[in-house]
């Protein structure tokens, strides 16, 4: 069972370069998320998508764009990378869509460690 | 966004109990979660509690919720070296599409 798959696992970029982080889930989940993890700051939500075709900003969206290409895939793009975007990026998914009822669990990928020099 | 706070470090001896604490600010929090992150890995759900409960036990794990004080704790009985990890408290509210995480507590278990 693959679950949530992120690529690449590691990446080094120069300031100003662009790149796209890929995420795919095979659990037929409606919601997908991008978080960044920085030391002492926990996980902060960058963008999320409650369903195919919709995306919404989280706590720290500046400098990022996202695309919910289909139900399986949710990509995160850095158009012009900055050293402040050096972080570990996690993609996650959960079954809910819109105002859900009942418990849900977020399933996480293994993370992408990005360094911007 | 909502604030979820945790202490950053906890060190215990193998066989002792560990208690990891968390406070949150959103009184409309509906579900509260504990996630575990091992080195180089993503987060895995350990347990969760619904806001109308005050305690949940799951094998070595006990979750206590004090809704009045907005305080959540995770107790790990008979802590093992394999429990060494970062533990994240998280909450979700009326908008179930968002999860808010604390900064994580790094648990170090000494043999």
Image (cartoon, coloured by chain):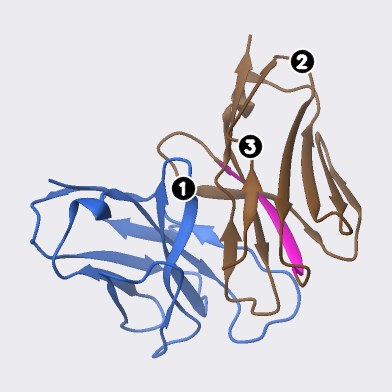
Q: Earlier in the sequence, mark 1 or mark 3?
A: 3
The number of discs equals: 3
Sequence-first tag of 2 and 1: 2
Mark toward the viewer: 2 or 3: 3
Q: Which mark is residue B42?
A: 1
- Label 3's element? loop
Q: Residues within 10 Å of mark 3 (few under 14, many from 20)?
A: some
Compute the Cα span from label 1 to label 3: 20 Å
Nearer the observer, A57 or B62: A57
The residue lying toward the viewer, choosing from B103 and A70, is: B103
> Pointer 1 indicates a residue of which chain?
B
Kindly indicate which chain is depicted in brown in the rendered structure: B
- Vertical side of B93 occupied by A108: above or below: above
Residue A117 location (% of width, % of height) = 12, 45
Determine the image quadrant of residue B24.
Answer: bottom right
- Measured Cα–Cα span from mark 2 to mark 3: 21 Å
Counting from the top left corner in percent of width and height, residue A100 is at 68, 82
Given this view, does label 1 or label 3 mark the residue nearer the observer?
A: 3
Disc 2 and disc 3 on one polypeptide chain? yes
Q: Are marks 2 and 1 in contact (CB under 8 Å)?
A: no
Kindly identify the residue that appears in the image at 60 percent across and 87 percent down. Answer: A98
Q: Which chain is blue?
A: A
On screen, residue A82 versus residue A89, left or right, reads left
Residue in view at x 58 percent, y 34 percent: B8
Boundaries of the magenta span: B29-36
Identity of the residue furthest to the bottom in this view: A53
- Residue identifier under label 3: B7
Quarter of the image with the N terminus of chain B in it? bottom right
Q: Main secondary structure of the magenta part?
A: strand
Residue B31 lies in the magenta-colored region? yes
B16 within the magenta span: no
The residue pinned by badge 2 equals B15
């Amino acid at each position: 069972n693959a679950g949530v798959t992120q690529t690449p696992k590691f990446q080094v970029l120069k300031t100003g370069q662009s790149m796209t982080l890929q995420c795919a889930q095979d659990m037929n989940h409606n919601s997908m998320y991008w978080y960044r993890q920085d030391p002492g700051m926990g996980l902060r939500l960058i963008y999320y998508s409650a369903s195919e075709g919709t995306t919404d900003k989280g706590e720290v969206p500046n400098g990022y764009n996202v695309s919910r290409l289909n139900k399986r895939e949710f990509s995160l793009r850095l158009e012009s990378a900055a050293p402040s975007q050096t972080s570990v990026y996690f993609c996650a998914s959960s079954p809910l869509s819109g105002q859900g009822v009942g418990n849900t669990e977020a399933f996480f990928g293994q993370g992408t460690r990005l360094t911007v020099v | 966004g909502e604030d979820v706070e945790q202490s950053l470090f906890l060190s215990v001896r193998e066989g002792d109990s560990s208690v990891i604490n968390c406070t949150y600010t959103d009184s409309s929090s509906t579900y509260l979660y504990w996630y575990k992150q091992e080195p180089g890995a993503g987060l895995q759900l350990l347990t969760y509690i619904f806001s109308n409960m005050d305690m949940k036990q799951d094998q070595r794990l006990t979750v206590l919720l004090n809704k009045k004080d907005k305080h959540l704790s995770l107790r790990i009985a008979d802590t093992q070296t394999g429990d060494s990890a970062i533990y994240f408290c998280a909450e979700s509210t009326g908008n179930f599409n968002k999860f808010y995480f604390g900064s994580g507590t790094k648990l170090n278990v000494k043999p």
